[in-house]
Amino acid sequence: MFAIEPYFAERRVLKTSDNGEHQRTWERVRVVGMTKDDAGQPAYLVECFHNGTSSLAFEGEIRRLEKGNPL
């Protein structure tokens, strides 16, 4: 794994609506590194935010918000 200059992006998540239906939505994250997954494909190390806390996760697919977006 190696660190990169952090930037904001979005990842796909599966959320449950109030009526119990599952929906795929995009959730804002901060990309802080890159690595390879078990199959040798690129994976992004992202920081996810949850009610004032944050956690790290690996994502295979992200969507960059803007080119050169500032932190």
Image (spheres, helix red, strand yellow):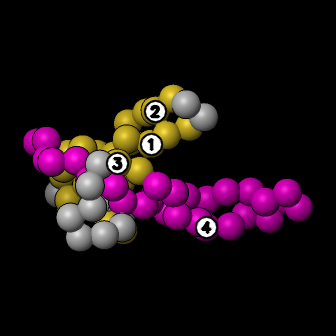
Q: CA distance from mark 3 to mark 1?
A: 7 Å
Q: CA distance from mark 3 to mark 4?
A: 19 Å
**Crowd rating for badge 3 (residues with CA inside 10 Å; few <14, some 14–19, many 20+):** many
At which x and y percent is residue 11? 44, 60
Q: Which amino acid type is marked by label 3?
A: Arg
In the rendered view of the protein, which quadrant contains the N terminus?
top left
Magenta region, main secondary structure: strand
Q: Which amino acid type is marked by label 4?
A: Arg
Q: Nearer the viewer, residue 68 or 19?
A: 68
Magenta extent:
1-28
At which x and y percent is residue 17? 78, 60
Q: Which amino acid type is marked by label 2?
A: Ser
Residue to which mark 3 is pinned: 30
Q: Mark 1 falls on what kind of element?
A: strand
Q: CA distance from mark 1 to mark 4?
A: 16 Å
Residue to which mark 4 is pinned: 24
